[in-house]
Image (tube, grey):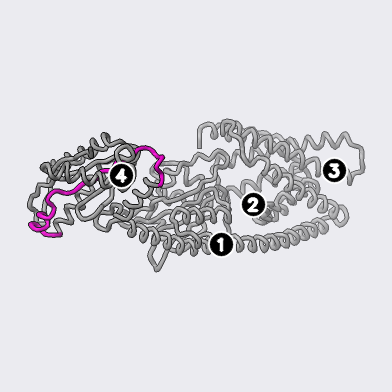
Amino acid sequence: MSKREKIYYSLIGFIGIILLIIEIFINKSLLVKYGWLLLLFLPLAIVANRKYIVLKKFIFKFDVIYVITAYFVLNYITALCLLILITIIKNIGYSKKEKLKILNEIGMISIVFVTAHYTSLYIISKIGISNLDKSLLNVFILMISMFVFSWFMLHLQFNIIHEREACKDFKVFIRHDFLSNSYVIISCCINYYLYNEMLYVGMFLGLCVIIIISYLITSLLQLKKHNKDLIVVSEIAAAMASKLDLRETLANIINGVCKSLDPDFCAIFEYDKGNNQLNLIDYKMILRFGLGIRIKDINKVVNENIDVITNYRNSVIIGDLYLLKNKLKNKSNNNVISYFRSIIYEPLILENNYFGCIMIARKERDFFYKEQLKIADIITNHAVIAYKNAKMFKKVKNESIRDSLTGLYNQRQFFAALEDININKRNNVTSLIIFDIDKFKNINDTYGHQTGDKIIKEISYIINSNIRKQDIVYRYGGEEFTVVLPKTNQIEAFKIGERVRYIISKETFYSCDGRKIDITISGGVSEFPKIADSSTKLLSYADRALYNGAKQKGRNKVSLYT
């Protein structure tokens, strides 16, 4: 928590508590008179706080209905105390928020509720209508006032703490608050009307009806969402099965999870058993409210706790990661653990072999629920097969285009590169170097083919390590190597070839049984299109330069075609 946040939370909490104490002192007689009813409302409101309707990612809780009902049935100060007690019990009991954040929330509630109360009293005093209508209108005015003042406080908080960083979802959350207030206003009006007709029995029946209707709405919405999720999962599975490219497969997995579960962060880690670490291979992070989490901080915390993570072989929901803060390592002391509260962990296991995991995170506590875990399980099962198929395809593809001994691109890929030069004749200049190990047959005859293979691997490594990033090395065949140098004339190519030749001539090589061997190479250079006007001639001219200009003139040379 930054210094700016600490000061703001402390100030709002202090002002709110002072305001609360003043109001309790002014209205203490009412609080004493209706204190026993406060004890009756409190357990009902706490239970209601744990019940809610989820509608398009937004949560509509029932506890506000009890508080506003208490406001009109009992009195203002009793309702305010009820709301403060619910907040304290909720945050200390099961939310486990930081103390300053709890203080800030209590302060905001006190400021908003007191301001809204006096605003509604002032407005209602100017309207001359019947008592019942007056009270129903008071519900409306109070809720609108609370809506306005709460959003003023939130906007102030974001301006101060986040240095005027705008909230991208501001309009969406205003719409949510408007819908929430409309829901509460209607419910409270029904409750108040029934209370006037049948006193506490009517109020109790009204709350029961609201909860039953809300339960039915929740069930219908969940059924609708399950059907939608099944459609999304089938689309994701089809998308993953249709692609064999590894990058596209990883992107489909990430996008599928984000589309179905709406996380703030989703990442795929691959387990490196040799080094006992999880390597991040793909991720997606949604920035909300000025999120300041760095991907390297996430990677660091994951690998600091790798033993804990890799021991989980079943998918799991962590409702509040902050509760495990003391059990997890965080040497870098970054805010990853305190920021990502809700986690879904999905291990990637195939044939009892753990090869990685998918981590899905959200900043809200208890955001994910069991049905979402089932969705994540289905996506992960498809992802495991799709990922392994893509890895196998990549391996087979590499084997088809790479030399098995050196790992360099093979002759087939070299000829494909030459064909590209022919097709793209308007491209910039391209040069070609052919290297050949001098007297390589003697090495095989003297030291054996195993030593010959060893020398070829070592030479290929030296060539590949001493060229530029844009240059590509191929094993042309036997002891011959080719290097394609795009956007390079033959003079520059000659300098690169000469540098490689010199490094190899100064290198010490050994046979498999430890005998020292002196190795040299020769090279030929040609250029397209200035010297050779086709890729066939480019290869032919470089080959002539190699044998006529280097091999026949004493070897251990690099020669230009002239």
The residue pinned by badge 3 equals: 137
Mark 2 residue element: loop
Corner quadrant of residue 19: top right
Which residue type does callout 3 highlight? Leu
Disc 2 from disc 4: Cα separation: 55 Å
The front one of 517 and 319 is 517
The residue pinned by badge 4 equals: 484
The front one of 135 and 419 is 419
Which residue type does callout 2 highlight? Lys
Disc 3 from disc 1: Cα separation: 45 Å
Q: Horizontal and vertical percent for residue 196?
A: 87, 52
Would residue 364 be found to the left or right of residue 358 on screen? Answer: right
Disc 1 from disc 4: Cα separation: 49 Å
Q: Name the residue: 69% across, 60% down.
A: 221
Which residue type does callout 1 highlight? Ile
Mark 2 / mark 4, whichever is N-terminal: 2
Residue 4 in view in this figure: yes
Q: Name the residue: 54% across, 43% down.
A: 98
Chain part drawn in magenta: 423-449
Q: Horizontal and vertical percent for residue 394?
A: 39, 58
Disc 2 from disc 1: Cα separation: 16 Å
Q: Horizontal and vertical percent for residue 468?
A: 30, 40
Residue 57, numbered label? 2
Mark 1 residue element: helix
| Disc 1 residue crowd, few under 14, some 14–19, many 20+, Cα 10 Å | some
The C terminus: image quadrant: top left
Mark 3 / mark 1, whichever is N-terminal: 3
